Amino acid sequence: MVTIIAVKHIFAAMNKLFFLDHWQTLVFIFFCAVSFIQLFYILFFFGRLALYKPKSKLVSQTHPVSVVICARDEAANIAKNLPGVLIQDYKTTHEVIVVNDNSFDDSKYVLEELQRSYKQLNIIELTQEAKMIPGKKFPLAVGVKSAKHEIVLLTDADCVPASEHWIQSMQSTFNDQTEIVLGYSPYHKQKSLLNKLIRWETFHTAIQYLSYALWGMPYMGVGRNLSYKKALFYKHKGFSAHNNIPGGDDDLFVNMAANKKNTKINIDKDSFTFSKPASSWKQWVRQKQRHYSTSKYYKGGHKLLLGLYAATQFLFYPALIATCLFYNWQIALIIYGGKFLLQSLVIGKSLIKLNEKDLLPYLLFFDIWMFFYYLIFSTSLIKKPSTSWK
């Protein structure tokens, strides 16, 4: 027994001495590991979107579509953006459902005025709050269940389609096996640092969920531009699995219902919907905190892959600096340069595909910014989400 204890102490002492003598090498090895993991995500996952080319269809088919929009106190946005949905160039049967959820402004009268000119507009007035169902899920469920057609296309009142072919483009992605189509919804471009950061974060989120879907592991979508079949909604009993969570009417539903066979993406520029970005840092932080508060409910495999990517992205620059200071700055910069070159090629190609090429000159800044981004929003993973969807 004494011998075993002595041996343990000897090994512990040897490990300690090894660490003390070789800790600089361990710092370098850690930096290499972090860099390799980042490169794996960039090439194996994000490269799929960079190289993605949608398959051309031999037979083109159009489907009846129900557009569903939920709105609360959105009179100004309805007046500004809803006509862009109502004037869509789509010859097949379609309807536009607006669920006016307990609005106190003039939304009702704006909608009634628009309905006089556009007969495809159907208005649902909600005058009571749903008990025990916080957030947007109840009005959205009412809208989906009221839809006359099998294909449901979702957007928000503060969104406007990029073109009059939005409905045509999104529905064209469906076939007999497809039940979910993930779209892209960028923000309007403005000349400010905040706007560039918001648009970068939106792109950065999109390159992940679109690339994962191409790999066969769809994990989320955004309600500003998302389409699925009504039968799928009923199959999973709507949002009942997470009705108690204020957010997640888009990403948690996709996380639950999507799989590699039933989900496709659409990055045709005609399929985009544009939103007005947050006008202040405080507003943007609040929006992102609301989003990240639902990610803790994703499937375990999704959380593992997303968490590993975020962790290594956060650790990359501290590991680079430590390697430069304590090991060999020349080797560190060579590895960094190779990684950044490959990253720029993949990310740059994807930026062009998603019509965000004006962000290309700021890639180095955005790459460094992500360290601070994770610091700012890390508490959102444990923070209790707001019960309001507005």
Image (cartoon, grey):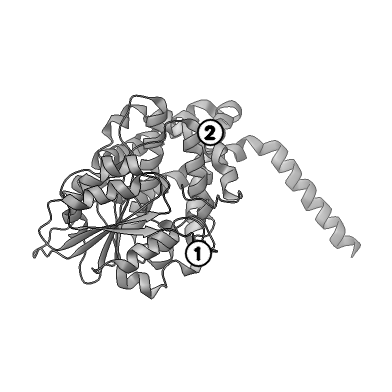
Q: Residue furthest right?
A: 2
Q: In this view, does 8 lie to the left or right of 172?
A: right
Note whether 108 is above or below 145 in the view shown.
above
Mark 2 vs 1, N-terminal side: 1
Image coords of residue 379 (percent x, y): 60, 44
Q: Helix or strand or loop: what does disc 1 sit on?
A: loop
* Horizontal and vertical percent position of residue 137: 44, 60
Compare residues 129 and 9 and report the one nearer the observer: 129
Tell me the crowding category of disc 1: few under 14, some 14 to 19, or many 20 or more residues within 10 angstroms, Cα based: some
The image quarter containing residue 226 is bottom left
- The answer to whether residue 23 is visible is yes
Q: What residue type is labelled 1?
A: Asn
* Quadrant of the image containing the N terminus: bottom right
Q: Residue 161's quadrant in the figure?
A: top left
Q: Residue 372 carries which label?
A: 2
Q: Position of residue 86 (x, y in %)?
A: 19, 50
- At horizontal 32% and vertical 28% (from top left) the residue drawn is 190
What kind of residue is marked 2? Answer: Phe
Tell me if 88 is positioned left or right of 14 in this view. left
Mark 2 lies on a secondary structure that is helix
Taking the spot 60% from the left edge, 48% from the top edge, the residue there is 383
Q: Which residue lies under the disc numbered 1? A: 243
Q: Which of marks 2 and 1 is in front?
A: 1
- Nearer to us in this view, 190 or 8: 190
